[in-house]
Amino acid sequence: MRQIAFALTERITMAWGLIREMGHVSIQTNDIEGSIFDATELLGLRVTERTDNEVYLAANSVHHELTYVQSEVNGIHSLGLIAQNGDALREIRRRVANENFKIVSETPVSAGVQDGFSFIGPEGWVFEIYTGMQHNDRGLLSFGPDRYGHINFHPRDVRGMMEFLRRIFDFRLSDVIGDDYAYFMRCNPDHHGIALIKGQGTFHHHAWQVQSIGDLAKLGDRLGAAGRELIWGPVRHGAGHNIAAYYVETSGAVVELYTDLEQIYDDERDPIIWGEDENWWNMWSNRRTEDFRTFGIPTVTELKTFI
């Protein structure tokens, strides 16, 4: 009988709340082959498992950090978070039940994890919480990111979503932008695992850590060779201090590659407060492409396609 080894990740992560680190993004796509091309040939991930309608991909030595689900529509299928341990998983399940959020599944939906559950949170965002991610050999890759890092989405009630993440998962506030305009939130020393910017309920981007700004230039080279383009960057963000570049993948979601993200090791650090019109989004220039925030995809619950 094949033995499956499980591990949280190879790297040791300090965390203070119930969530150890960001787990994965699962995206429904109406062109799964195009999405796989983008993830492997542009981003630099590897396929770790494939079923009839799903494909799992990773940069790190884990079973998956990105999942594509074949669908007639494009949308966010679920957002995965890794609990600290079994006790943390049960505490999150208790909090979810106390607030009467709808449970999608009492058992893991994704392959490659030991224990978990899924529920529909505010504004229809589906969260999958789990422990015990299967360990896979990363192998030798010619290019690509070190790991999945964070997400950015645009809830209508941005303060309500921020309070939900604090209340259910114990996320911390790192930076606050304007008067209920944006919140950058962390679950471990990474400056943010989830960034919230007030909007129309869409998902904007998933982000991946690379070694240096040189990797962002190589991304631009790959995009150009494929007849694609960066939609913004490289830029130096004020909130988080990371250097980042962005492109749009086949599903319509934005992908960010970043390096030099601020690390916060003091759990008592007060949030940094920015005015909405300050250069929290680019320390190198006050310019930003006008359509940058118009990209993105909805939740599948809003599309009424979640099963």
Image: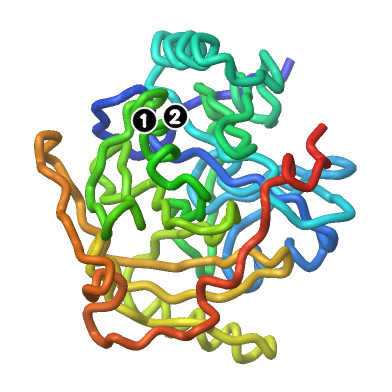
The quarter of the rendered structure image containing the N terminus is: top right
Q: List the residue tagged with mark 2.
A: 8
Label 1 with label 2: CB-CB less than 8 Å: yes
Residue at image coords 65%, 71%? 41
Q: Nearer the viewer, residue 181 or 28?
A: 181
Q: List the residue tagged with mark 1.
A: 20
Outermost residue toward the front?
Answer: 179
Residue at image coords 62%, 64%? 296
Q: Amino acid at mark 2?
A: Leu
Label whose residue precedes the other's in the sequence (1 or 2): 2
Residue 73 appears at what percent x and percent y?
83, 55
Residue 292 appears at what percent x and percent y?
51, 77
Q: Indicate the secondary structure of the residue bearing disc 1.
A: strand
How far apart are the alpha carbons under marks 1 and 2? Answer: 9 Å
In the drawing, does residue 237 fall left or right of residue 244?
left
Q: Can you tell which quarter of the image residue 105 is in? A: top right
